[in-house]
Amino acid sequence: MSRIAVIQTAFPGDVILCTPVFESLKSAGHEAVAVVRPDAAPLLKNNPFVQQIIVYDKRGGPGSLIRAASALKSARCDAALIVQRYLKSGLLPLVADIPQRTGYDIAPAAFLYTDLIPYQTDSHEVERCLALCAGFSKTVGYTPKIFISDDEKQQTFDILKLHGLGRGNLIVLAPGSIWNTKRWVGYSALIDLIGEKSGYRIALLGSPADFEVCEAINKGAASVAVNLAGKTDLLVSAAIMQRAVLVIANDSAPAHLAAAVGTPVVAIFGPTSPKFGFAPYSSKCAIVENRYLYCRPCSTHGPQKCPEKHFRCMREIAAGDVWAAGEKLLSC
């Protein structure tokens, strides 16, 4: 049995897509030490496949790197799988004196690794993450999973009961994203469309930074959704999604949360594209996009402003098309 560090210091959605690695390593008898950024750490606190969580804030300067490396050195890992293609992420296991360091051949820190894995641009990110397990454990057969405690389930029950949101009639919309151009502009129209054509109740989920976004969406709609943005943490949000019949979200972490708890999800892609390998990893997922627009994809993450200044990738996606995709999932 080996003790293996899994370093993924990107955003929470990326950490969700990395969770199959922990299960794969555990299945082969290894212990996994997760190294993640502060806002992603709560996602793993109930994960039975993770032995230890080390928080590393890449924006904290050299001191943050030294502290994370010290914690990682104390964890006495035999090997490290470096998932994120970022120089500091690749430097961390070297500073922590981890002898075997496996990462992608295209990573900026590839010259620091002892073992290189080809980065397959035509594969899904889940499959790329699992490819790093070669030589340690199985590289197929695992999907993203989020684990919710009894306490978080009780919090969810209390929140839904307070707002009259029952199991079987709840649709969750997650309209936020840290990338401005990933935010679809049609959520107000979608709320009205769902209200006109169905008996479903709607809850809006997101971070505290998304609260005003959700308030503006509600003001733009004739119907009213329950705005829970900023009122739940990541795992309670996941638990609410688990009780929903459908989640509709942008290309962002909530879409991956929904897939990880098994709820059907409609993912709206604008400046980015599913071909990059970051669509929700689920058979119960529908993608809505302005497929043939000449200028997309314009970015792997999504710029803060539309380079062409027209934002057609999101403005030209109709609420009817999004709801049609949702209805199809609901009928399956």
Image (spheres, rainbow, N blue to C red):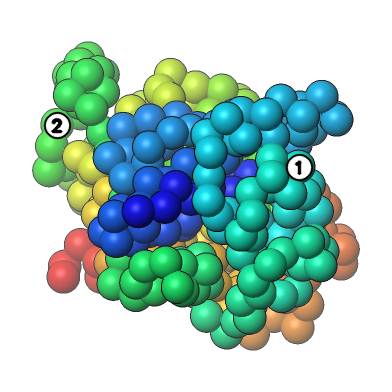
The one of 27 and 97 positioned closer to us in this rendering? 97
Observer-nearest of 164 and 36:
36
Dot 1 or dot 2: first in sequence order is 1
Return the residue at label 2. 166
Instruction: Please identify the quarter of the rendering in which residue 148 is found.
Output: top left
Q: Amino acid at mark 1?
A: Val
Q: Is residue 270 visible?
A: no
* Horizontal side, residue 186 vs residue 85: left or right: left
Which residue is depicted at the point 73% across and 54% down? Answer: 90
Q: Residue at x 46, y 74 (%)?
A: 134
**Residue 81: percent from the left, percent from the top?**
56, 58
Q: Classify 10 Å Cα crowding around label 1: few (below 14), some (14-19), many (20 and above).
A: some
Q: Mark 1 = which residue?
A: 95
Q: Describe the element under mark 1 as helix, strand or loop.
A: helix
Q: Within 10 Å of the Cα at label 2, are there few (<14), some (14-19), or many (20+) other Cα atoms? A: some
Quarter of the image that includes the C terminus? bottom left
Residue drawn where x is 27% and y is 40% of the image: 48
Q: Amino acid at mark 2?
A: Gly
Q: Please tell me which residue is depicted at 23% across the width and 27% down the height of the picture.
A: 149
- In this rendering, does residue 9 appear at all? yes
Spatial separation of the CA atoms under disc 1 and disc 2? 51 Å
Of residues 223 and 259, the one drawn nearer to the viewer in this rendering: 259
Q: Nearer the viewer, mark 1 or mark 2?
A: 1
Rendering coords of residue 66 (x, y %)? 77, 29
Total residue callouts? 2
Q: Tell whether label 2 touches label 1 (CB within 8 Å).
A: no
**Looking at the image, residue 69 lies above or below residue 13:** above
Left or right: residue 169 versus residue 327 is left
